[in-house]
Amino acid sequence: CPPNHGWRQNGATQCQPCAVGTEEIEGLCKPCAAGFANPREASHCVKCGPGTSSDRGRACKMNPNLGGDGQLRWDSRRFLRTWRNQTRNAGGFTRIVVEDRTYYMNLAQPMELPGASLEFRGHQAFVWEALPPRMSDVSTCPTEASFVRPDMLEAIRPNEGKPSGLWFNFLGRCFANGGELSGRRLHLLLSCHPEADPHDFSLLSAMEPPDMMTGCQDLALEWRTKLACPVCQEGDWEAVTPTRCDPVRGQRVTYIAPSGCFGGAKPPEDYWEPCPGVLNLVAFVVVGAFVGCILCCLSIYVLLL
């Protein structure tokens, strides 16, 4: 059989391209082992990247917990539950418009995009990008609208620095230069912004929209969303005191999480404490009164002598 082709089942009469989720081993198409995946026909299984895992014969998907080990932690089950609820009435996709591009995204699983061009029918992807017709450099006729699809979730990594969030790295295929197949990556930063608009997407990299000659540039997008905020852990909470203090009641100590987390471990209860300096003043008065009493007693004793 040719490379990445084999007998899909015992008793088959001809070699066939090994299906998605399988690879050729000793002439037979066998499912990828757990922790490996193959999103394309007639290809080979590759190891799932950081933050992802797979069952036997399945695609790489988000791990239940991301981060941790003394660092920020995300609960992907909460993330996916919220995602599915928000996209239930849209076939699992959320539609994002960035400049002149339209993205159809499903971070939960790869899916076929309804209405895609004929050559993309039956294919599945996490993210689809639709480009408007563009003017050709050779003629005045506009090119057809095209679709590019990151169909493999390579890795999920915490963002290093501020704001807190997660990087989703996708690897896909892109057709450019008259149908030539090329690789393409999409880097999606989900950044923690609890008050952001649900559709607050923007291009991170200053790239021109793909043209006829170089239509497969990598892309970097940022999505500001509450979904990217990590789960609160006990060590996330820091005590904060007000700038002003009531001399009678004192000051109220509250707790905040600089990471912008939500859910998970609850903050410690607020409490009141004396204003800074008040305790020292009271101690000074008490000690002064005590010393004064001693001196007074010594004076009386001397007079009596």
Image: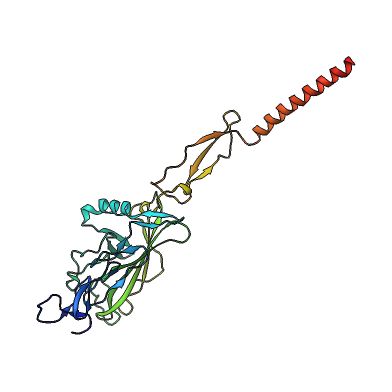
Q: Is residue 117 above or below residue 166?
A: below
Q: Residue at x 9, y 81 (%)?
A: 13
* Foreground pick, 195 / 238: 238
Give the residue at the far right of this rendering.
Answer: 305
- Residue 161 shown left or right of residue 189 in the figure: right
Q: Is residue 210 visible?
A: no
Q: Residue at x 39, y 46 (%)?
A: 264
Quadrant the N terminus occupies: bottom left
* Foreground pick, 262 / 106: 262
Q: How many marks?
A: 0
Q: Residue at x 53, y 42 (%)?
A: 240
Give the residue at the far top of this rendering.
Answer: 304
- Residue 229 shown left or right of residue 283 in the figure: left
Residue 273 position, x and y percent, is: 57, 34
- Residue 19 shown left or right of residue 80 in the figure: left
Quadrant the C terminus occupies: top right
- Residue 278 shown left or right of residue 159 in the figure: right
Give the image quarter of residue 23.
Answer: bottom left
